[in-house]
Image (tube, rainbow, N blue to C red):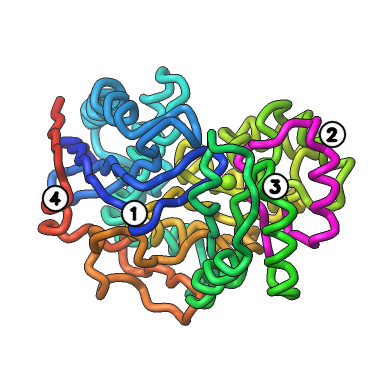
Amino acid sequence: MRIAAVELIWLDLTLRQGLVTAAGTHLARPVVMVRVLSDSLEGFGECAALEMPSYSEEDAAGAWRVLRDYLAPAVLAASAQLATRGPAEAEPGVDSLVGPLIDACGCIRGNPMAKAALEMALVDLALRDIGISLADHLRLEVTDVACGGVLGMPAGQRAGAQRGAYEDPAALIAAAEEVLASGCARLRVKIRPGYDIAPLSALRERFPDLAIQADANGSYVPGDLAILERLDAIGLTCIEEPLGEGGHTGHAWLAERIATPVCLDESLGSLHQVREAISLGACRVACLKPSRLGGLIAAVEAHDLCAQAGVACFCGGMLETSYARIANAAYAGLPGFVLPGDLAVEDRFMEPDILDPGDVPPAPAGRAGIYRPAGLAPHPVANLLAARAVRRELLRL
Ligand SMILES: [Mg+2]
């Protein structure tokens, strides 16, 4: 699997509705796509880095630069080097095809989302080279997985706004009903100090049996313990990334003081961090994202670690296009994903995104279908990709 070229493609997408979280408001969604080419095949990866470094330290422009200047050249050089060693093993696997190429990026610190995008493209190429789907590679038996809905905050609750009043319960319930209308099995609600007890209580009153998760995006501090203790009465499935400081020891401290299971997301940024969180008892639930963990190969291992430790997993979303969502749906088919993931291929963008809707694997309402042909997901349609692309750069050795 000689890598002949790597192309970076910058897509400018716009969300139909801004998503307001404790970390900021997302409306523009630039997406850096990575296309790797062998002599006869191509593979696509999608970078999760957002417009701004608000969810994590990475942003789309920085990921582009790191991919262009360091990661893609490293993989091209490693591929050329490997090609001089003669024919590959008789029956190569995904890990043996992709692993040595990704190892070449090891000298670049951090930047998990940029690395994950390149690895994703290489995994797609390797799957197509071997002729199997990601679902086959992961030995999945399921045909579809449950989707969960996400409810952002009202626009007035954006970060930096005055700590806010919760003033419009009717609008909140209407927004939740709209999300749930697609058949989603749970509601994940973005919260922050000042926008927490009241909206969550209202949702619980309206939906007594619904699985409700709260995602704080690290917006509380240990001094907010009294508020976090009050969340116990609401009966949440979990509270996600409650603390913005204190790390795993802080979350372990909190986990001993509240009955609501603590879930970690942002602070599970590597396999080391997953191991540490488990050993400290910092989480009973894990939001796993291949993009944040540096790629699918590490993400599968993170899933295995969580499953062995009895930590319930769900697959989180990063405002992906349908392409990455379909890939994530297969990842979420692993048995440790006992909670619904952010996997709905929905009308999220102002314009149709980069796939032919007819290529999206079918599934019952509220579920995401598992893609079974060779590769990670159906490839973007060339003219849709061209129409959304504002910048392209082809890199060769
Ligand atoms: Mg989160």
Q: Secondary structure at mark 3?
A: strand
Crowding at mark 3 (Cα within 10 Å: few <14, some 14-19, many 20+): many
Judged by depth in the image, the label closer to the viewer, 3 or 1, is 1
Magenta span: 212-238
Residue hosting label 3: 263
Please give the name of the residue rendered at 24% of the width and 26% of the height, measured from the top-left corner: 68
Q: Please give the label number shown on residue 40.
A: 4
Q: Residue 150 lies in what quarter of the image?
A: bottom right
Among numbered discs 2 and 3, the one appearing first in the sequence: 2
Residue 269 counted in the magenta span: no
| Quadrant showing the C terminus | top left
Judged by depth in the image, the label closer to the viewer, 3 or 4, is 3
Please give the name of the residue rendered at 28% of the width and 40% of the height, measured from the top-left corner: 32
Residue hosting label 1: 15
Among numbered discs 1 and 2, the one appearing first in the sequence: 1
Residue 290: percent from the left, percent from the top? 48, 45
Residue at mark 3 to residue at mark 1: CA–CA distance: 27 Å
Residue 11: percent from the left, percent from the top? 22, 45
Q: Are marks 1 and 4 in contact (CB under 8 Å)?
A: no
- Horizontal placement of 79 versus 290: left or right? left
Is 115 drawn above or below residue 121 in the view shown? above
Q: Are marks 1 and 2 in contact (CB under 8 Å)?
A: no
Crowding at mark 1 (Cα within 10 Å: few <14, some 14-19, many 20+): some
Among numbered discs 1 and 4, the one appearing first in the sequence: 1
Q: Are marks 4 and 2 in contact (CB under 8 Å)?
A: no
Please give the name of the residue rendered at 32% of the width and 51% of the height, measured from the top-left corner: 124
Q: Secondary structure at mark 4?
A: loop
Residue 75: percent from the left, percent from the top? 28, 29
Kind of residue at disc 3: Cys
Residue hosting label 2: 253
